[in-house]
Amino acid sequence: MNKLFLWAIAHLLFFSGKPVSSKKADEVASERHLKNIVQLTFGGDNAEAYFSFDNKKLVFQSNNSKWGLSCDQIFILDIKAQSQDTSLPIPMLSTGLGRTTCSYFMPDGKSIIYASTHESNEACPPVPDARKLKKYVWPIYPSFDIYQADLAGNIIKKLTDSPGYDAEATLSPQGDKIVFTSDRSGDLELYTMDIDGKNVQQITSTLGYDGGAFFSPDGKKLVFRASRPKSKDEIEEYKSLLKQGLVAPTNMEIFVCNVDGSDLKQITHLGKANWCPFYHPNGKRIIFSSNHHAQSGYDFQLYAINEDGSDLEQITNQSAFNAFPMFSFDGKKMVFSSNRNNGGTRATNVFLADWVD
């Protein structure tokens, strides 16, 4: 679902593995936490790239038209091999049908999970017409379910089979739990389940869109972004859009709770859209994407903040879009998506950097 936000950013605004050049040397120097940045994808919208548990591979989604894609599908790349020779083919792991989103490695490294609409309809589902709606929205496709597939692309198991939207799944670092977003209760809430799809537990229950959740390094907490409509008009609009299978993700903040939903805390109070949170390996800081600083709504930069909401620090300042950060499990690398270095096109690509505290 986050990827549809990326699609909209691209409309608002080739694989080489070479170090990124910059239009502004001072901007590169000021991104002090990111060293040796390497661009891994070129062309189309590429996002939500996440590490395998051994830090050797990335799984991500792309709609690169050069690959014959009409909407997002799931791909896998070997980090070392692709960094050295980006002419290598990048295998597709999804079916090539419907729309996919939010892939993540299983702990054994032999399979992945992702959400897909292919079982309902092999065609790409329609994207909302923002001009007609006069509002920026995300579609909540009720045909999304979560699947497990091996690295040859064969679907092993369907992990959700509840009516409505089931997507945005990620795994705990311990490899024993999956967190995902579902509207099975009538609202968009967080749920956890075992990696075999059993033992489903509802985690959140406050009105608003709870999604994009990740576990803390010790697996005891969840960080996620959420909308919280409060006024009568906001609540009516949220409920009206949700009935149409839509949400307006322009006002979201970062929240943290225990994995059972207790001790829920709002971390940011920045306004506008704050999303894509991920825990720093120390378990005390959170990196996320935000446009709270921007005069225009589509300037997204990465920020870091303490778990108690203190010490906000800007991490990136290049380009108009930086999002989907994830740290490698050893804490040495960070992968993210950005429209930097795209030659003036609308392309958003995957970048890998050494992380320096």
Image (spheres, helix red, strand yellow):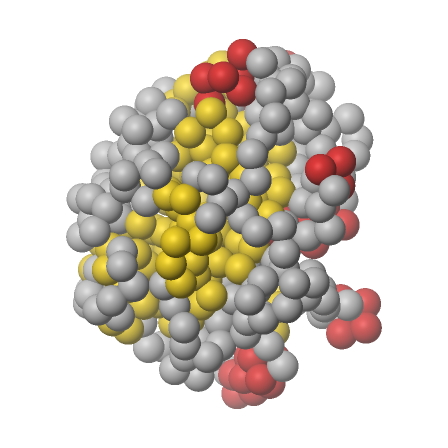
Work out whether 345 lies above or below 258: above
- Residue 45 appears in the rendering: yes
Whole-percent x and y of residue 332? 33, 22
Pinpoint residue 68: horizontal percent, then vertical percent.
74, 42
Camera-side residue of 193 and 27? 193
Residue pictured at 58% horizontal, 71% vertical: 120
Quarter where residue 356 is shown: top left
Query: Can residue 310 be seen at all in this image of the molecule?
Result: no
**In this picture, residue 52 sits left or right of residue 321:** left
Q: Is residue 292 left or right of residue 204?
A: right
* Residue 58: % across, % down: 45, 33
**Quadrant showing the C terminus:** top left
Residue at (69% x, 61% y) in the render: 124
> 112 left or right of 39?
left
In which quadrant of the rendered view does residue 194 lie?
A: bottom left
Residue plotted at (64% across, 68% down): 121
